[in-house]
Amino acid sequence: MTCLHLAEFARTIAAFDEQPLSISYVTSGRRRRYTPDFRFLWENGQEWFVEVKPAERLATPENNERFAAIASYFESTGARFVALTEEHICHSNRSQLVSYLLHMRPYESVPNVCADLDWRGAHSVNFAEAIEILGSYRNVLEALAVRNLVCDLHQPLAAETLVRPFAEADDDALFV
């Protein structure tokens, strides 16, 4: 799965683009150029500039210094710099589940029937209870697909999987 699958899956990312701009920054007394891999524009107006690197390349002293300078640059503009590795992006079950849920998204927009539901006094319910509440297995999958509901994406879906209404922090958690 790519970083863009996660961006597409995130409910509160309004837009994303590849290699959106180039910046100039200084590190070790030298001026350098940098182009982030992606820009995510969130519905709340926040911008994230994202770099995707293999974990072993991200953790070098040179890259630590470089990315600290880049992060400082973006912070000065009010944006956020996020460096992601394959460990962040490619959890095996999460990759499969996100791909599956993206395919389950309905073609037409669906109302958020989950926010006002009676969750039986609980913050979350298990998948089997959600089927009872929403009326069908497909309704629960579609609610997960459009992120009206969320669950632990690192575990396979099962009757005991806990689901709950979406909260804004759930999209941040996809990346950090």
Image: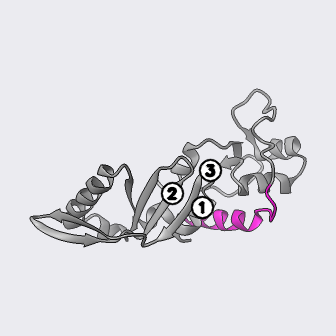
Q: Which residues are magenta?
A: 90-109
The residues bearing labels 2 and 1 have C-alpha atoms spaced at a distance of 23 Å
The secondary structure making up most of the magenta span is: helix
- For residue 94, the mark is 1
Helix, strand or loop under label 3: loop
Indicate whether 66 appears above or below 146: below
Q: Does the magenta segment cover residue 175?
A: no
Q: Quadrant of residue 52?
A: bottom left
Image spot of residue 159 (x, y percent): 78, 49
Three-letter code, disc 1: Arg
Residue at mark 2: 41
**In front: 167, or 56?**
167
In the rendered image, which residue does mark 3 sit on? 152
Q: Earlier in the sequence, mark 1 or mark 3?
A: 1
Amino acid type shown at disc 3: Asp
Q: To which quarter of the image does residue 15 belong?
A: bottom right
Amino acid bearing label 2: Leu
